[in-house]
Image: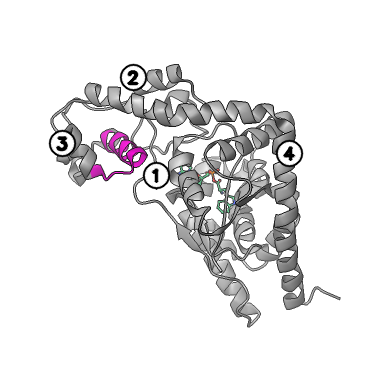
Protein backbone atom coordinates (compact mmCIF):
# COMPACT_ATOMS: atom_id res chain seq x y z
CA UNK A 1 0.00 0.00 0.00
CA UNK A 2 1.26 3.46 -0.90
CA UNK A 3 -0.01 6.17 1.41
CA UNK A 4 0.87 9.86 1.41
CA UNK A 5 0.64 12.31 4.30
CA UNK A 6 1.71 15.91 4.17
CA UNK A 7 0.74 19.21 5.69
CA UNK A 8 1.05 22.94 5.48
CA UNK A 9 0.79 25.43 8.31
CA UNK A 10 -2.20 27.74 7.92
CA UNK A 11 -0.25 30.88 8.71
CA UNK A 12 -1.43 33.30 6.06
CA UNK A 13 -1.03 33.31 2.35
CA UNK A 14 0.59 30.36 0.69
CA UNK A 15 3.38 31.34 -1.69
CA UNK A 16 5.12 30.04 -4.76
CA UNK A 17 7.64 28.15 -2.60
CA UNK A 18 4.84 26.21 -0.92
CA UNK A 19 3.28 25.60 -4.30
CA UNK A 20 6.36 24.39 -6.20
CA UNK A 21 8.04 22.75 -3.20
CA UNK A 22 5.01 20.86 -1.92
CA UNK A 23 1.52 21.39 -3.36
CA UNK A 24 2.50 20.61 -6.96
CA UNK A 25 3.65 17.19 -5.75
CA UNK A 26 0.50 16.77 -3.64
CA UNK A 27 -1.55 17.24 -6.80
CA UNK A 28 0.54 14.88 -8.91
CA UNK A 29 0.36 12.15 -6.27
CA UNK A 30 -3.42 12.24 -5.82
CA UNK A 31 -4.05 9.82 -8.66
CA UNK A 32 -1.68 7.06 -7.65
CA UNK A 33 -1.60 7.16 -3.84
CA UNK A 34 -4.05 7.22 -0.99
CA UNK A 35 -3.47 10.81 0.17
CA UNK A 36 -3.97 12.59 3.48
CA UNK A 37 -3.44 16.36 3.25
CA UNK A 38 -3.58 18.31 6.43
CA UNK A 39 -3.82 21.90 7.59
CA UNK A 40 -1.18 21.87 10.31
CA UNK A 41 -3.01 24.18 12.70
CA UNK A 42 -1.39 22.75 15.84
CA UNK A 43 1.96 23.66 14.33
CA UNK A 44 0.68 27.16 13.65
CA UNK A 45 0.17 27.88 17.37
CA UNK A 46 3.83 27.32 18.24
CA UNK A 47 4.04 31.10 17.79
CA UNK A 48 1.44 33.60 18.99
CA UNK A 49 -1.51 33.95 16.65
CA UNK A 50 -4.81 35.79 17.04
CA UNK A 51 -7.69 33.27 17.25
CA UNK A 52 -9.72 35.00 14.55
CA UNK A 53 -6.69 35.05 12.23
CA UNK A 54 -6.06 31.36 12.82
CA UNK A 55 -9.64 30.48 11.94
CA UNK A 56 -9.49 32.59 8.80
CA UNK A 57 -6.14 31.08 7.80
CA UNK A 58 -7.42 27.52 8.23
CA UNK A 59 -10.30 28.22 5.85
CA UNK A 60 -8.26 30.16 3.32
CA UNK A 61 -5.56 27.48 3.26
CA UNK A 62 -8.23 24.82 2.70
CA UNK A 63 -9.49 26.96 -0.20
CA UNK A 64 -5.92 27.21 -1.55
CA UNK A 65 -5.54 23.40 -1.45
CA UNK A 66 -8.64 22.97 -3.57
CA UNK A 67 -7.85 25.90 -5.88
CA UNK A 68 -4.41 24.42 -6.59
CA UNK A 69 -6.00 21.25 -7.91
CA UNK A 70 -6.52 18.94 -4.95
CA UNK A 71 -9.74 17.04 -5.44
CA UNK A 72 -11.70 16.54 -2.22
CA UNK A 73 -13.12 13.31 -3.59
CA UNK A 74 -9.70 11.80 -4.21
CA UNK A 75 -7.93 13.06 -1.08
CA UNK A 76 -8.60 13.20 2.62
CA UNK A 77 -8.35 16.90 3.47
CA UNK A 78 -8.61 17.82 7.16
CA UNK A 79 -7.31 19.98 9.95
CA UNK A 80 -4.71 18.48 12.27
CA UNK A 81 -6.41 19.68 15.48
CA UNK A 82 -9.66 17.94 14.52
CA UNK A 83 -8.02 14.50 14.81
CA UNK A 84 -7.07 13.93 18.44
CA UNK A 85 -4.71 11.07 17.75
CA UNK A 86 -2.01 13.50 16.50
CA UNK A 87 -1.60 15.04 19.94
CA UNK A 88 -1.92 11.70 21.69
CA UNK A 89 0.74 9.98 19.63
CA UNK A 90 2.93 13.06 19.84
CA UNK A 91 3.18 12.64 23.63
CA UNK A 92 4.13 9.00 23.30
CA UNK A 93 6.77 9.83 20.69
CA UNK A 94 8.09 12.58 23.01
CA UNK A 95 9.10 9.67 25.20
CA UNK A 96 10.82 7.88 22.32
CA UNK A 97 12.72 10.84 20.82
CA UNK A 98 15.97 11.93 22.49
CA UNK A 99 16.79 15.49 23.57
CA UNK A 100 20.06 15.30 21.64
CA UNK A 101 18.14 14.61 18.43
CA UNK A 102 15.94 17.68 18.88
CA UNK A 103 18.93 19.83 19.70
CA UNK A 104 20.26 19.21 16.22
CA UNK A 105 17.16 20.63 14.46
CA UNK A 106 18.34 23.63 12.46
CA UNK A 107 14.86 25.03 11.88
CA UNK A 108 14.35 25.53 15.61
CA UNK A 109 17.63 27.42 15.81
CA UNK A 110 16.58 29.64 12.89
CA UNK A 111 13.04 30.26 14.13
CA UNK A 112 13.91 30.80 17.78
CA UNK A 113 16.72 33.16 16.79
CA UNK A 114 18.91 34.62 19.46
CA UNK A 115 16.30 34.40 22.20
CA UNK A 116 15.83 30.64 22.62
CA UNK A 117 14.80 30.99 26.28
CA UNK A 118 11.64 32.80 25.20
CA UNK A 119 10.65 30.41 22.41
CA UNK A 120 7.66 28.19 23.16
CA UNK A 121 8.33 24.58 24.13
CA UNK A 122 5.99 23.71 21.25
CA UNK A 123 8.38 25.30 18.77
CA UNK A 124 11.14 23.09 20.15
CA UNK A 125 9.16 19.81 20.16
CA UNK A 126 7.35 20.59 16.90
CA UNK A 127 9.27 17.97 14.86
CA UNK A 128 7.91 15.27 17.19
CA UNK A 129 4.34 16.36 16.48
CA UNK A 130 5.27 16.23 12.81
CA UNK A 131 6.53 12.66 13.23
CA UNK A 132 3.22 11.79 14.92
CA UNK A 133 1.31 13.33 11.97
CA UNK A 134 3.09 11.00 9.59
CA UNK A 135 3.32 7.83 11.66
CA UNK A 136 -0.27 7.90 12.89
CA UNK A 137 -1.31 7.16 9.27
CA UNK A 138 1.56 4.74 8.63
CA UNK A 139 2.38 6.94 5.64
CA UNK A 140 4.86 5.53 3.12
CA UNK A 141 5.63 8.81 1.31
CA UNK A 142 5.83 12.43 2.46
CA UNK A 143 6.07 15.19 -0.18
CA UNK A 144 7.86 18.23 1.28
CA UNK A 145 10.29 20.99 0.37
CA UNK A 146 13.93 20.67 1.35
CA UNK A 147 13.56 22.64 4.57
CA UNK A 148 11.57 19.75 6.04
CA UNK A 149 14.12 17.07 5.16
CA UNK A 150 15.80 17.07 8.56
CA UNK A 151 12.40 16.70 10.26
CA UNK A 152 11.68 13.70 8.05
CA UNK A 153 14.98 12.13 9.07
CA UNK A 154 14.04 12.65 12.70
CA UNK A 155 10.67 11.03 12.04
CA UNK A 156 12.42 7.99 10.57
CA UNK A 157 14.77 7.80 13.59
CA UNK A 158 11.81 7.94 15.97
CA UNK A 159 9.96 5.19 14.09
CA UNK A 160 13.05 2.98 14.03
CA UNK A 161 13.70 3.49 17.76
CA UNK A 162 10.07 2.79 18.65
CA UNK A 163 10.18 -0.43 16.61
CA UNK A 164 13.45 -1.46 18.27
CA UNK A 165 12.36 -0.51 21.80
CA UNK A 166 9.24 -2.65 21.57
CA UNK A 167 10.72 -5.40 19.41
CA UNK A 168 8.01 -4.93 16.79
CA UNK A 169 8.13 -3.99 13.15
CA UNK A 170 5.20 -1.68 13.77
CA UNK A 171 5.74 1.77 12.31
CA UNK A 172 6.38 2.08 8.62
CA UNK A 173 9.56 4.05 7.84
CA UNK A 174 8.41 6.88 5.52
CA UNK A 175 10.26 8.21 2.48
CA UNK A 176 10.49 11.94 1.77
CA UNK A 177 9.53 13.08 -1.73
CA UNK A 178 11.47 16.25 -2.51
CA UNK A 179 11.17 17.96 -5.91
CA UNK A 180 14.22 18.11 -8.21
CA UNK A 181 14.03 21.75 -9.26
CA UNK A 182 12.04 23.61 -6.61
CA UNK A 183 13.18 21.95 -3.40
CA UNK A 184 14.10 25.40 -2.11
CA UNK A 185 12.53 28.41 -3.84
CA UNK A 186 14.39 31.54 -2.78
CA UNK A 187 13.26 35.07 -1.94
CA UNK A 188 12.82 37.45 -4.87
CA UNK A 189 14.84 40.04 -2.95
CA UNK A 190 17.72 37.88 -1.74
CA UNK A 191 18.82 34.70 -3.50
CA UNK A 192 20.39 33.37 -0.31
CA UNK A 193 17.17 33.49 1.72
CA UNK A 194 14.31 31.02 1.42
CA UNK A 195 10.99 32.38 0.12
CA UNK A 196 8.96 32.48 3.30
CA UNK A 197 5.62 33.54 4.74
CA UNK A 198 7.42 35.19 7.62
CA UNK A 199 9.64 37.49 5.51
CA UNK A 200 8.70 41.08 6.41
CA UNK A 201 8.77 42.15 2.78
CA UNK A 202 5.83 41.03 0.68
CA UNK A 203 8.00 41.83 -2.35
CA UNK A 204 10.11 38.79 -1.45
CA UNK A 205 7.42 36.30 -2.46
CA UNK A 206 4.64 35.60 -4.93
CA UNK A 207 1.50 34.67 -3.00
CA UNK A 208 -1.11 32.40 -4.50
CA UNK A 209 -3.61 35.21 -3.85
CA UNK A 210 -1.60 37.94 -5.60
CA UNK A 211 -3.36 40.04 -8.23
CA UNK A 212 -1.91 40.54 -11.72
CA UNK A 213 -0.78 44.03 -10.72
CA UNK A 214 1.04 42.69 -7.66
CA UNK A 215 2.82 40.06 -9.75
CA UNK A 216 3.91 42.69 -12.29
CA UNK A 217 5.22 44.89 -9.49
CA UNK A 218 7.03 42.10 -7.65
CA UNK A 219 8.82 40.80 -10.74
CA UNK A 220 9.78 44.31 -11.75
CA UNK A 221 11.41 44.73 -8.34
CA UNK A 222 12.89 41.21 -8.18
CA UNK A 223 16.65 41.33 -7.73
CA UNK A 224 18.78 40.09 -10.66
CA UNK A 225 22.22 40.97 -11.98
CA UNK A 226 23.48 42.95 -14.93
CA UNK A 227 25.10 40.00 -16.73
CA UNK A 228 23.30 38.42 -19.69
CA UNK A 229 21.63 35.04 -19.33
CA UNK A 230 24.11 32.24 -20.04
CA UNK A 231 25.21 28.82 -18.79
CA UNK A 232 27.48 30.46 -16.26
CA UNK A 233 24.45 31.13 -14.02
CA UNK A 234 24.48 27.60 -12.61
CA UNK A 235 28.24 27.49 -12.27
CA UNK A 236 28.97 27.18 -8.53
CA UNK A 237 31.54 29.96 -8.62
CA UNK A 238 29.27 32.45 -10.41
CA UNK A 239 27.34 33.29 -7.22
CA UNK A 240 24.41 34.44 -9.38
CA UNK A 241 21.91 33.20 -6.80
CA UNK A 242 18.98 35.44 -7.77
CA UNK A 243 19.43 34.52 -11.42
CA UNK A 244 19.49 30.81 -10.54
CA UNK A 245 16.28 31.21 -8.60
CA UNK A 246 14.31 32.98 -11.33
CA UNK A 247 15.45 30.58 -14.05
CA UNK A 248 14.58 27.60 -11.86
CA UNK A 249 11.09 28.91 -11.09
CA UNK A 250 10.50 29.54 -14.78
CA UNK A 251 11.73 26.05 -15.67
CA UNK A 252 9.55 24.39 -13.07
CA UNK A 253 6.41 26.27 -14.11
CA UNK A 254 7.09 25.20 -17.70
CA UNK A 255 7.99 21.64 -16.63
CA UNK A 256 11.29 22.02 -18.49
CA UNK A 257 14.92 21.68 -17.41
CA UNK A 258 17.01 24.69 -16.38
CA UNK A 259 19.28 23.91 -19.34
CA UNK A 260 16.40 24.23 -21.80
CA UNK A 261 15.36 27.61 -20.37
CA UNK A 262 18.96 28.87 -20.39
CA UNK A 263 19.28 28.01 -24.07
CA UNK A 264 15.93 29.68 -24.80
CA UNK A 265 17.11 32.99 -23.26
CA UNK A 266 20.83 32.64 -24.07
CA UNK A 267 22.49 36.07 -24.43
CA UNK A 268 19.36 38.04 -23.46
CA UNK A 269 19.29 40.22 -20.40
CA UNK A 270 16.99 39.93 -17.42
CA UNK A 271 14.72 42.80 -18.36
CA UNK A 272 13.64 40.80 -21.39
CA UNK A 273 13.34 37.57 -19.42
CA UNK A 274 11.21 39.33 -16.80
CA UNK A 275 8.51 40.16 -19.37
CA UNK A 276 8.02 36.49 -20.26
CA UNK A 277 8.39 35.46 -16.64
CA UNK A 278 5.65 37.87 -15.52
CA UNK A 279 3.28 36.57 -18.20
CA UNK A 280 3.98 32.99 -17.22
CA UNK A 281 3.39 33.68 -13.54
CA UNK A 282 0.13 35.48 -14.24
CA UNK A 283 -1.01 32.62 -16.45
CA UNK A 284 -0.27 30.22 -13.60
CA UNK A 285 -1.25 32.14 -10.49
CA UNK A 286 -4.32 34.13 -11.59
CA UNK A 287 -6.66 31.15 -12.06
CA UNK A 288 -5.59 29.81 -8.65
CA UNK A 289 -6.08 33.20 -7.02
CA UNK A 290 -9.56 33.59 -8.57
CA UNK A 291 -10.55 30.11 -7.40
CA UNK A 292 -9.32 30.77 -3.84
CA UNK A 293 -11.53 33.85 -3.77
CA UNK A 294 -14.55 31.96 -4.97
CA UNK A 295 -14.07 28.94 -2.70
CA UNK A 296 -13.38 31.07 0.36
CA UNK A 297 -16.80 32.66 -0.05
CA UNK A 298 -18.50 29.30 0.32
CA UNK A 299 -17.62 28.58 3.93
CA UNK A 300 -20.19 25.81 4.37
CA UNK A 301 -18.67 23.89 1.51
CA UNK A 302 -15.16 24.17 3.02
CA UNK A 303 -16.40 23.14 6.48
CA UNK A 304 -18.17 20.14 4.99
CA UNK A 305 -15.01 18.98 3.26
CA UNK A 306 -12.99 19.36 6.47
CA UNK A 307 -15.61 17.50 8.52
CA UNK A 308 -15.66 14.68 6.06
CA UNK A 309 -11.85 14.59 6.09
CA UNK A 310 -11.84 14.56 9.88
CA UNK A 311 -14.07 11.50 10.00
CA UNK A 312 -12.01 9.53 7.50
CA UNK A 313 -8.66 10.55 8.98
CA UNK A 314 -9.83 9.79 12.54
CA UNK A 315 -10.85 6.27 11.57
CA UNK A 316 -7.34 5.46 10.38
CA UNK A 317 -5.54 7.36 13.15
CA UNK A 318 -7.65 5.88 15.98
CA UNK A 319 -6.84 2.39 14.80
CA UNK A 320 -3.08 3.16 14.95
CA UNK A 321 -3.48 4.61 18.46
CA UNK A 322 -5.22 1.48 19.63
CA UNK A 323 -2.36 -0.66 18.35
CA UNK A 324 0.26 1.68 19.83
CA UNK A 325 -1.41 1.53 23.25
CA UNK A 326 -1.52 -2.24 23.07
CA UNK A 327 2.16 -2.43 22.16
CA UNK A 328 3.31 -0.20 25.00
CA UNK A 329 1.04 -1.64 27.69
CA UNK A 330 -1.43 1.22 27.99
CA UNK A 331 -4.57 -0.72 27.13
CA UNK A 332 -6.30 -2.22 30.13
P1 LIG B 1 5.33 24.88 6.03
O1 LIG B 1 3.93 25.26 6.31
O2 LIG B 1 6.42 25.76 6.50
O3 LIG B 1 5.54 24.68 4.48
C1 LIG B 1 4.66 23.84 3.73
C2 LIG B 1 5.43 23.11 2.65
O4 LIG B 1 6.02 24.05 1.75
C3 LIG B 1 7.41 23.77 1.64
N1 LIG B 1 8.12 25.05 1.47
C4 LIG B 1 8.98 25.30 0.47
N2 LIG B 1 9.40 24.54 -0.54
C5 LIG B 1 10.29 25.11 -1.40
N3 LIG B 1 10.74 26.38 -1.28
C6 LIG B 1 10.34 27.18 -0.27
N4 LIG B 1 10.77 28.42 -0.17
C7 LIG B 1 9.41 26.64 0.67
N5 LIG B 1 8.80 27.14 1.78
C8 LIG B 1 8.01 26.15 2.25
C9 LIG B 1 7.80 23.09 2.95
O5 LIG B 1 8.97 22.34 2.82
C10 LIG B 1 6.58 22.26 3.21
O6 LIG B 1 6.64 21.04 2.49
N6 LIG B 1 6.16 21.36 9.48
C11 LIG B 1 5.60 21.61 8.17
C12 LIG B 1 4.12 21.23 8.10
C13 LIG B 1 3.86 19.85 8.56
C14 LIG B 1 4.13 18.64 7.86
C15 LIG B 1 3.70 17.60 8.71
C16 LIG B 1 4.68 18.37 6.61
C17 LIG B 1 3.31 19.52 9.76
N7 LIG B 1 3.20 18.16 9.85
C18 LIG B 1 3.83 16.25 8.35
C19 LIG B 1 4.82 17.02 6.25
C20 LIG B 1 4.40 16.00 7.09
C21 LIG B 1 5.71 23.09 7.87
O7 LIG B 1 5.83 23.91 8.75
O8 LIG B 1 5.59 23.38 6.54
Q: Which quadrant is the N terminus positioned in?
A: bottom right
What is the CA distance from the residue labelled 2 to the residue labelled 1? 22 Å
Residue that lies at the very extreme toward the right in this rendered image:
332
- Given residues 172 and 43, the one toward you in this image is 172
Mark 3: few, some, or many residues within 10 Å (few <14, many ≥20)?
some
Determine if the magenta segment contains residue 257. Answer: yes
Q: Earlier in the sequence, mark 1 or mark 4?
A: 1
Q: Residue under label 2, please give it.
A: 220
**Disc 1 on helix, strand or loop?**
loop
Front position in the image: 22 or 103: 22
Q: Report the residue marked by disc 4.
A: 303
Q: Which residue is mark 3?
A: 230
Q: Is residue 162 left or right of residue 89?
A: left
Look at the picture and state if 83 lies above or below 325: above
Write down the residue under mark 1. Answer: 184
The local secondary structure at tag 2 comes to helix
* Residue shown at the point (47%, 57%) measured from the top left: 150
Cα–Cα span, label 3 and label 4: 49 Å
Amino acid sequence: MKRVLSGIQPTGNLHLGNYLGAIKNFVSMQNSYECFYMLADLHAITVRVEPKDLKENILSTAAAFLASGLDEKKNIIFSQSSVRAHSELSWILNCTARVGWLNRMTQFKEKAGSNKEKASVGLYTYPILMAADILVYQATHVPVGEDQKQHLELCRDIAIKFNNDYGKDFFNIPEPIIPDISARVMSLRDGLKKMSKSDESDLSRINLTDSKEQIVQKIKKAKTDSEPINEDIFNEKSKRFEAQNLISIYADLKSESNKKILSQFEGKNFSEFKKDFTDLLIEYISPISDKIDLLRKNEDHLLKILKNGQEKASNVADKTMKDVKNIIGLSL
